[in-house]
Image (cartoon, rainbow, N blue to C red):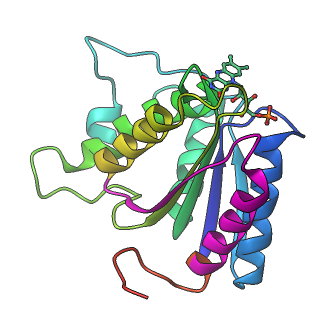
Amino acid sequence: MKFLIISGNPKKDGLCHGAEEELIRGFAEGGADCEVLTLEKLDRCHVCGDGWGICREQHRCAFGNDGFSAAQEKVKAADAYCFITPVYWAEMAEALKNFFDRLRRCEASRQFGGGGDPSALAGKQVLLVASPGGSGNGLLSCLEQMDRFCRHTGAVIFDYIGINRWNNDYKKEALRAAARALAQGRKAGETL
Ligand SMILES: Cc1cc2nc3c(=O)[nH]c(=O)nc-3n(C[C@H](O)[C@H](O)[C@H](O)COP(=O)(O)O)c2cc1C
């Protein structure tokens, strides 16, 4: 199993970075390969034409040579994911939001009209993690935004975890355990 941690975190220290480290430990303990995909260098969607560009028919981005196409390939190659972001303005961090705007167009559009190839994320499990490191507000709206991306692209949500300044001791344990369980093959919907 190949796991991809897709991170909106711009920092190399702090709460969100600490959460990422626990995920990496958990995947390793479960015996799975894991890579972290960071997105700071990617541009936002150019909203080509009258709302759609080649993303609708060709399922790739016309501006993909900024690193987007390579990131899209990594998403295709992975078997499961963790999406992790600091909470900014009660939403995902801009880097993740921009990437998901572009990826959703390319992948969700595969199934327009029915009968097309499934999206690269279809049927694959995702652990959603958000860290509201300031007031602690905005966790639910941020997770909801990630949830909606999963629904559009057919990804299967394994769990939702929020981590903040006053719960990170026990939430780090939960993150590590969730990553380990995923790596060991646990499936959403299975009763323990
Ligand atoms: C532009 C911006 C907006 C933010 N908005 C929120 C917010 O809505 N709620 C919150 O709890 N924290 C907010 N924060 C704080 C971040 O969530 C916090 O920096 C993040 O959780 C990561 O913590 P870390 O910087 O220690 O990794 C915001 C930070 C920035 C830079």
State whether residue 103 appears in this view: no
Residue 172 horizontal/vertical position (percent): 74, 60
Name the quadrant containing residue 104.
top left
State whether residue 54 appears in this view: yes
Asked whether residue 161 is drawn in magenta, I would say yes
Residue 184 horizontal/vertical position (percent): 60, 86
View quadrant of ligand 1 = top right
Name the quadrant containing residue 103.
top left
Asked whether residue 105 is drawn in magenta, I would say no
Residue at coordinates 20% horizontally, 50% vertically from top-left? 111
Residue 19 horizontal/vertical position (percent): 76, 53
Give left or right: position of 86 versus 81.
Answer: right
Nearest the viewer among 38 and 26 is 26
Residue at coordinates 75% horizontally, 43% vertically from top-left? 166
**Quarter of the figure that contains the N terminus:** bottom right
Marks counted in the figure total 0
- Whether 27 is drawn above or below 145: the answer is below
Q: What is the residue that sits farthest to the front in this orientation?
A: 166
Residue at coordinates 19% horizontally, 56% vertically from top-left? 116
Give left or right: position of 146 versus 66.
Answer: left
**Quarter of the figure that contains the C terminus:** bottom left
Residue at coordinates 48% horizontally, 62% vertically from top-left? 159
Nearest the viewer among 111 and 31 is 31
Nearest the viewer among 43 and 186 is 186
Nearest the viewer among 5 and 109 is 5
- Whether 128 is drawn above or below 43: the answer is below
Residues rendered magenta in the picture: 154-181
Q: What is the residue that sits farthest to the right in this orientation?
A: 13
